[in-house]
Amino acid sequence: MENVRKPIINSYLVLLSLCFCASFHHTAAKGGLFTSLRSDSLDDRYAGSGRHLFQEKQLSKEEHFRRLNKLAEGYMSNADLEKAIKAFNRRCNSISRIYSIGESVLGVPLWVIEISDKPGKDEPEPSFKYIGNVHGDEPVGRELLLLLANWLCDNYMKDPLASSFFLANLIVDNIHLHILPSLNPDGYQSRKRGNANDVDLNRDFPDQFFHMNDDLSMRQPETKAIMSWLTKIHFTASATLHGGALVANYPWDGSEDEKKHYYACPDDKTFRYMASVYSNSHHNMSRSKEFPGGITNGAQWYPIYGGMQDWNYIHGGCFELTLELSDDKWPHASEIPDLWEYNKMSMLNLVASLVKTGIHGRIFSSNQGRPLPASIAINGINYTIKAGDAFADYHRLLTPGDKYEVIATMPGYKSKSTSIVLGEEASTVDFILDPVVTASDDLLPRGCDCSYDSKKLKLLTGEQSKFLLIFVFISLFLCFLMKRRAILSFVRQKQGAGAGPKRPVGV
């Protein structure tokens, strides 16, 4: 048996060494061979499945770095990117703001552009995020995201006769779009996949199937920044931009048995719809011969673990896609204008789909009318989303053309449900929940409102307070007169009965 195993093992080691020496130019983007050491045993066996991993000439690390340095000519450096972000904000400050979600290992700020008609303000609107340059040697995303921001600035409220006017206005007026052009500036600077600690950031998140990355102290600062970001902003959907293939990838990215096969998440149908929105709007993605329709389930392509995409869906309530934009991980800079034209409508339509379809609404209490941060579930889909805390607004992505039973639940309130048929346009479904009546509540008189209403109290401290004070003063004066009269009457009776000499009475 040992004699049989040795040739197989030797062949496998040769294959791995060839893959390691091959140029990154055609390396698998989602899986890749240069990953975190903590996840090698789980996904390296699938690295590059269905990809072009070999080149006629194998390159040393030094030659590879020199080649990428040559290709990087025409791309923005990290300093150039920061200048471009700040210049954009100055030019479009009426519909944008910039902020940082943290720093990389080497202290480079992770700058975000927010685009909205009311940037930085809470509104009952969905939020979408784009993230580029997750892998340092996949720089196309950072270039396209700056082009996307500038396109929205150039077309918002400009020419009402142009089709671009309506799409730009739809996004800016109804969605909060957050753009992080580079999650991995350190990896970009060194022309390598991982960050400054040689960790693949797309393997550094907690995993649903395997206990990896559970130790907070072991996570990378870029990973921590993303996780903290999602606790502050309730994103409805998002996408990360990668390179090395041409396909829209959707969950699950891994399988419970570690095998390469289709592994669907609860919202599989909705994710396939979202991926198709991107692919069908693309110049040629949907015509892929490798991926039917230009979309793929991650686990069927090749499983990965500790990925950002699955973590967003499970822990952030955020529907995320992984978008592979180019067969070449680092195409020549002269190709960027063409790549922008190929992806422009896909990027815009994916964001716009948040308000063009699905169900949206708000949830209120029937007794006080206050917003309730309740949960929304769909009968038959084992996944719930939570309404926002400030406005109790929810935004549930669903596939058009189907019938759904929508259920709103909140502790202390009676659940309510309604059935809708979702057409091609979005539907608005609001809920008013009744509080649960307990035994102690039954002891109160019907119609008794024991709630504190600050607005009503303010009326008594305003104009009506003058009348109240006059009324109290008159009442006290009348009581005084009545008491005085009663005392005088009592004294006269005593005097009339001969009770001693008369004396003055002070009242």
Image: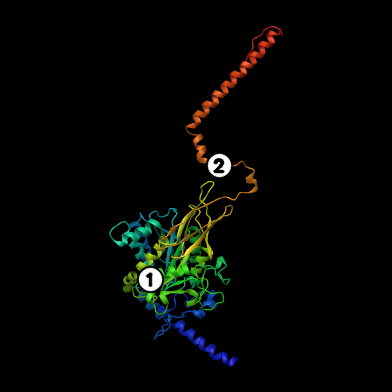
**Where is residue 43 drawn, in percent x and y?**
52, 77
**Where is residue 164 drawn, in percent x and y?**
31, 62
Q: Quadrant of the C terminus?
A: top right
Which element type, helix, strand or loop, lies under badge 2?
loop
Question: What is the spatial separation of the Cα atoms under label 1 and label 2, in whole angstroms?
Answer: 55 Å
With respect to residue 77, does 99 lie above or below? above
Look at label 2 and name its amino acid. Answer: Tyr
> Which is more toward the observer, 422 or 391?
422
Which mark identifies residue 280? 1
Which mark identifies residue 452? 2
Asked if residue 128 lies left or right of residue 441, the reply is left
- Counting other residues with Cα less than 10 Å from the Cα at mark 2, is it few (<14), some (14-19), or many (20 or more)? few
Q: Please tell me which of labels 1 and 2 falls first in the chain.
A: 1
**Where is residue 347 drawn, in percent x and y?**
38, 66
Q: Quadrant of the N terminus?
A: bottom right
In which quarter of the view is residue 248 placed?
A: bottom left
Query: Are the residues flagged by discs 1 and 2 in contact, CB closer than 8 Å?
Result: no
